[in-house]
Image (cartoon, rainbow, N blue to C red):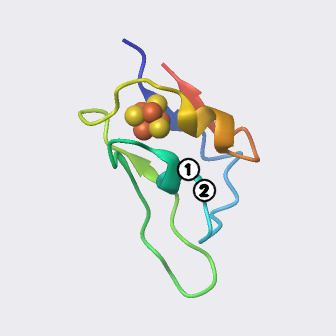
């Protein structure tokens, strides 16, 4: 099964990242900083490959491998 991962060069590190909200298994976490957030992190052990995160990212910064 393919798992989701963040393509960091496309990610704008928004603290309002919708990717972490749509994941049904809570596989996506993101540390907040002051104005920018860190890159989201996807836990491959929790990812079920549903691709909701791929569909919701406005920058196309989530891919499957
Ligand atoms: S593919 Fe689905 S389960 Fe995996 S990180 Fe994305 S939203 Fe979560």
Q: Eyeballing the image, is 31 above or below 43?
A: below
Residue annotated with mark 2: 18
Q: Eyeballing the image, is 6 above or below 1?
A: below
Q: Position of residue 2 (x, y in %)?
A: 42, 16
The residue depicted at 63 percent of the width and 84 percent of the height is: 35
Residue annotated with mark 1: 19
The residue depicted at 65 percent of the width and 67 percent of the height is: 14
Give 33 or 45, whichever is nearer the viewer.
Answer: 45
Q: Quadrant of ligand 1?
A: top left
Q: Is residue 14 left or right of residue 43?
A: right
Q: Secondary structure at mark 2?
A: loop
Q: Secondary structure at mark 1?
A: helix
When asked about the image quadrant of residue 17, the answer is: bottom right
Alpha carbon separation for disc pair 1 and 2? 4 Å
Q: Position of residue 13 (x, y in %)?
A: 63, 63
Label at residue 32: none
Answer few, some or many: residues within 10 Å of disc 2's Cα (few below 14, many 20 plus, some between 14 and 19).
few
Q: Is mark 1 within 8 Å of ligand 1?
A: yes
The quarter of the image holding the N terminus is top left
Q: Position of residue 50 (x, y in %)?
A: 46, 25
Q: Position of residue 21 (x, y in %)?
A: 50, 56
Q: Answer whether labels 1 and 2 touch (C-beta < 8 Å).
A: yes
Q: Is residue 42 left or right of residue 18?
A: left
């Amino acid at each position: 099964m393919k798992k989701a991962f963040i393509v960091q060069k496309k990610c704008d590190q928004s603290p309002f990242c919708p990717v972490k909200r749509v994941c049904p298994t809570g596989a996506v976490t993101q540390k907040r900083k002051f104005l920018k957030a860190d890159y989201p992190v996807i836990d491959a052990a929790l990812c079920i490959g549903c691709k909701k995160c791929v569909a919701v990212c406005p920058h196309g910064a989530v891919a499957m491998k």
